[in-house]
Structures are given as structure tokens and as C-alpha cells.
Image: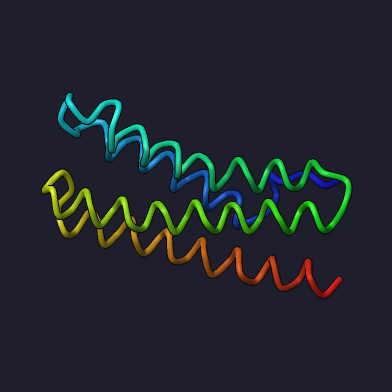
Amino acid sequence: MQDYRPLKVWQKSHSLALRIYSATATFPEPERYGLTSQMRRAAASVAANIAEGCGRAGRAELRQFLYTSFGSASELEYFLLLARDLRFLTEKQQEALDMSVREVKRMLTGLIQRVEQQ
């Protein structure tokens, strides 16, 4: 078990989740239980799965939670495209958030590789 808070990938994913919450605050009211909720859940899931994996006893469990986190980040990438195409986000907003998601995914890939090598 280890503390997740010092991990840069967790810090970046937490920051991303906060940015997603802010960006979706302006989505249309009918999307409150649709795309808004899905994007927020996916974004929170990235950081939450890192935290949960760090709270587990073994490397195999940590690795599985990191893969789940990676999957949530991939899901969020699609939701960002959908939000842009529905004109809920500007292209500039989508690109900035997508760049952050891709950075988190790269960091997760590196962490997964380190965990697998141990």
C-alpha cells in the first residue's frame, strides 16, 4: 500500500477532473443526467482508480486498477469529442482538455510499465 497523493499522475488526473466539472457546468440542463454525468464520472474514475489501486496490498491489484483508470481516460477522450461535436465545448476547450487526458494516459502507461517490471 502507498499514498497516492504524491503521485504526479494522480495529481494531474485530479486536476483534470476539476477542469471537467468546471467545463460541464455550462452544458444544457437536459444533459445533466446524460453527458454531463458521464463525463464527470469518467474523469473522477481516473483519479479514483489510481487511489484505490494504491490502497490495495498487491502489485497485481494496483496494475488492474491502473488499467481501469486508463480505460476511464479513454472513455473521457470520446466524451470530449462528442461534447465538441454537439457544440457543448468549443474546439479550443476540447483540444486543451484532450491534451490533458493524453498526458495522463502517457503517465499511466509509464506507471503501469514500472509496476509490471517490479
The C terminus appears in which quarter of the rendering?
A: bottom right
Number of marks present in the image shown: 0
Task: From the viewer's side, name the closer residue of 86 and 11.
Answer: 86
Q: Position of residue 38 (x, y in %)?
A: 37, 38
Is the image coloured rainbow, by chain, by secondary structure, or in one colour? rainbow
The residue most toward the left is: 87
Q: Position of residue 84 (x, y in %)?
A: 18, 53
Q: Is residue 102 above or below residue 97?
A: below
Q: Position of residue 62 (x, y in %)?
A: 76, 53
Residue 32 located left or right of residue 51: left
Residue 24 located left or right of residue 9: left
Point 88% across, 46% down: residue: 57
Task: From the viewer's side, name the closer residue of 69 and 17.
Answer: 69
Q: Is residue 17 above or below residue 80?
A: above
Point 76% across, 71% down: residue: 114
Q: Position of residue 35 (x, y in %)?
A: 28, 38
Point 73% across, 47% down: residue: 53
Point 37% across, 43% down: residue: 19
Q: Quadrant of residue 33?
A: top left
